[in-house]
Amino acid sequence: MPTNETDEPAGASRAPRLALAGAALAFTSMYLAAGALTPLLVVYKEQWDLAPSQLTMAFAVYAIGFLAAALVLGSLSDHLGRRPVLIGALVVQLVSNLMFLVAPDVGWVIAGRIVQGLASGAATGAFTAALVELAPPHQKRLGPILGSVGLTGGLAVGSLLAGLAIQLTPSANTIAFVFLSALTVVGGIAVAAAPETMRRSPGALRSMIPNVAIPLAARVEFVAAAPVVAAVWMLAGLSGGLAPSMVHSVFGLDSGLLDGLAGFIAPAVSVIIGLSFARVPARTAMTIGIYAAILGSIGIAGGASAGSLATMFIGQAVAGLAFGAAFTASLGLVIPLVAAHQRAGVVAAVYVVSYLGLGVPVVLAGQLTDVLGVVPTVGWYSAVVVLLALFSLLAQERLKRRTPLQESRQTHAVHP
């Protein structure tokens, strides 16, 4: 992304803590809504007698909207300012909430998920930057922490609270999206009242041309990390798109709370690991994440096969560890290898791998479930995750054996 900030962006140093809290609330509201859909999709499935393929499609189209918006609009706030982009995204988010509130059929839910993905994709980069810029000068690390907790933590808490609402009331969908709509409005007001932290600059239209690039200096690391990045996002898709419905279809339990818990465990563990691994060397974190992806997928498949919900939940927790360790490590290994002006293209490439890994496999799994059933499909799905993780493990072992001459050549490619 272009970096046109001054050392002290206008108003940022004077921004009250209330502005930071308001921006964090607004950001979290977006991912609370995304997480709430995880158990609510099970309600829609029962209400409208949906096939597994329709359920997974309703989950996965979020990735299409997110990826499209992130690639086209991800840098727009660097030129128009943070507030216009964030307010626009929150308005779009409000529209998606209202679509879920009044949805008469699955077509509305699918459309709402695409709109929701567009809002999140447009806003995530801008919110992440704004949280850093609004943080006090002596607490700049607070911005990324709030961003991480708001995103992954929002997904987890949204799923759990929606599951609790399903357990307690037949009006869970109405309660959830009335509350989330109100929260989005409050967040929008908070963003509108916050100081602008980015000066307007030319180049807005040019910034909307997608830039996906992997410079030569980062290509080896990217290729080594890409399989496990896809694998951990596949596990995220499994936890969000299939696991909640498996509580009923595989384990025979009718519990909204357990549906919500199935969507809560992996992202909750992921955010904890992501924060606690901040000082762990990226190569070490990557190796831990790869092994965790293998063990987590085996645990999920084993739990489904054995009819043990507890085993599946443990597998999901390990999968959350894999996501928190491997995905963060992939960025830590690749980003330092490229020049500042190349980072946006590399991050976009990581986004492409991630969200294709989130969306495409779970849609295929839904189609396969219609034919084979849930348990065999989860077994095949987990086998693909293990295979991808093993590819990355072999690649990481080769990278560890690189000679000092190879390392110096790579460094020279970044800093000629």
Image (cartoon, grey):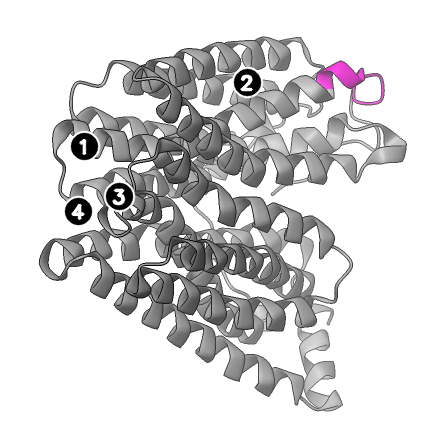
Q: Which residue is mark 1?
A: 46
The answer to whether the residue labelled 1 contacts the one labelled 2, judged by CB atoms less than 8 Å apart, is no
| Type of amino acid at the residue the image marks with label 4 | Ser
Q: Residues within 10 Å of mark 4 (few under 14, many from 20)?
A: some
Q: Which mark is residue 53?
A: 4
Q: Residue at x 32, y 42 (%)?
A: 64
Task: State which quarter of the image contains the N terminus.
Answer: top right
Answer with mark 3 or mark 1, whichever residue precedes in sequence. 1
Q: Which of 294 and 286 lies nearest the eye of the viewer?
A: 294
Q: Which residue is mark 2?
A: 84
Find residue 14 and report its image quarter. Answer: top right
SS at circle 2: helix
Q: Indicate whether residue 17 is drawn in magenta.
A: yes
User: Would you say residue 125 is visible in this rendering?
Assistant: yes
Q: Mark 2 or mark 4: which is in front? A: 4
Q: Residues within 10 Å of mark 1 (few under 14, many from 20)?
A: few
Q: Mark 1 or mark 2: which is in front? A: 1
Q: Which of 201 and 327 lies nearest the eye of the viewer?
A: 327
The span shown in magenta is 10-19
User: Would you say residue 200 is visible in this rendering?
Assistant: no
Answer with mark 3 or mark 4, whichever residue precedes in sequence. 4
Task: State which quarter of the image contains the C terminus.
Answer: bottom right
Answer with mark 1 or mark 2, whichever residue precedes in sequence. 1
Report how far apart the C-alphas of labels 2 and 4 lie in the structure.
37 Å
Report how far apart the C-alphas of labels 3 and 2 lie in the structure.
43 Å
Answer with mark 2 or mark 4, whichever residue precedes in sequence. 4
Residue 294 at x, y percent in the picture: 47, 71
Q: Which of 300 and 20 lies nearest the eye of the viewer?
A: 300
